[in-house]
Image: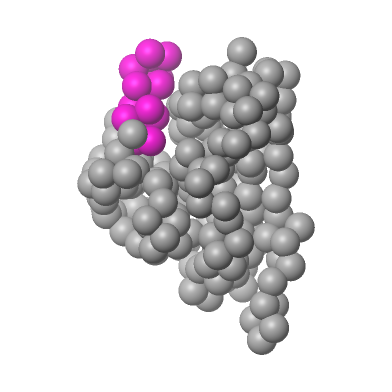
Amino acid sequence: FQEYGSFRKGSNFIAEKIGDDESKVLIISSHIDSVQNSGANDDGTGTISALAIAKALNKYRSKYTLRVLGFDQEEIGLVGSKAYVKSLNKNELIGDIQLEMMGTNTRKDGVFHVIDCDKSHSTFLTNSIAQAIVDNNIDLKINKACTTRSDHAKFWDANLPAVVLSENFFGGDSDKCYHKKCDILDSRIDFNYIEKITKAVAYSVKNLIEAY
């Protein structure tokens, strides 16, 4: 755990699988706080996805290190990710893949966001995920959008590569329980949809850290 802050104290969760070449690190991240609710979708789904990817890749040896991060205090201004990026060795970072709320898909169309805002240092992460979808015949479609409303933005502030994934939030198919008391584990959470996104990210991560 990374404890930080004096006024706004918090704690980020950090776990690593060390690669053969410890000089390079890929991060998969989520935020572990919520808005005075259960946070089942926001961001329980992203956190579960990150842990599932870590579990799936645990059996592989890899060239580069995989780091799993749970950021605290995202909901009050990206506080945890700001503290973390400040402490990060910038030269070691391959990139950050931030997993946001990905639990609802009411249209059942498999559309989701991989957001890089066309930043030249980050588009390779989007391309890697898109290629993983094609290579593994995963029934998903990427809908472009742009936002700085999650922890990936603190990496961008430091001119570091990052993307954020979410359900089709900006495409008119957002969770009706976003930031409401009803963000609980119920029938609106589409585990098949979550599984598809998680698989796409896992295959992409495997390639980016060159796991074998």
* Main SS class of the magenta portion in the image: helix
Q: Nearer the viewer, residue 124 or 106?
A: 124
Q: Nearer the viewer, residue 190 or 98?
A: 98
Q: Please tell me whether residue 117 is drawn above or below residue 86 in the rendered image.
A: above
- The image position of residue 131, as x and y in percent, is 34, 21
Q: How many marks?
A: 0
- Where the N terminus falls, by quadrant? bottom right
The image quarter containing residue 124 is: top left
Q: Judge from the rendering whether residue 208 lies leftward or rightward of residue 111; answer left or right.
A: right
Residue 56 visible? no
- Where the C terminus falls, by quadrant? top right
Q: Judge from the rendering whether residue 121 lies leftward or rightward of residue 41; answer left or right.
A: left
- The image position of residue 16, as x and y in percent, is 71, 39
Residue 90 visible? yes
Residue at horizontal 53%, vertical 75%? Answer: 76
Residue at horizontal 54%, vertical 43%? Answer: 92
Residue at horizontal 54%, vertical 26%? Answer: 209
Q: Nearer the viewer, residue 42 or 79?
A: 79
Residue 186 in magenta stretch: no
- The image position of residue 150, as x and y in percent, is 44, 60
Q: Please tell me whether residue 94 is drawn above or below residue 176 in the rendered image.
A: above
Q: Judge from the rendering whether residue 120 lies leftward or rightward of residue 34; answer left or right.
A: left
The image quarter containing residue 108 is: top left
- The image position of residue 129, as x and y in percent, is 39, 29
The image quarter containing residue 13 is: bottom right
Q: Please tell me whether residue 113 is drawn above or below residue 88 in the rendered image.
A: above
Which segment did they paint magenta? 125-138
Residue 132 in magenta stretch: yes
Residue at horizontal 44%, vertical 56%? Answer: 155
Q: Please, which colouring scheme is shown?
A: one colour
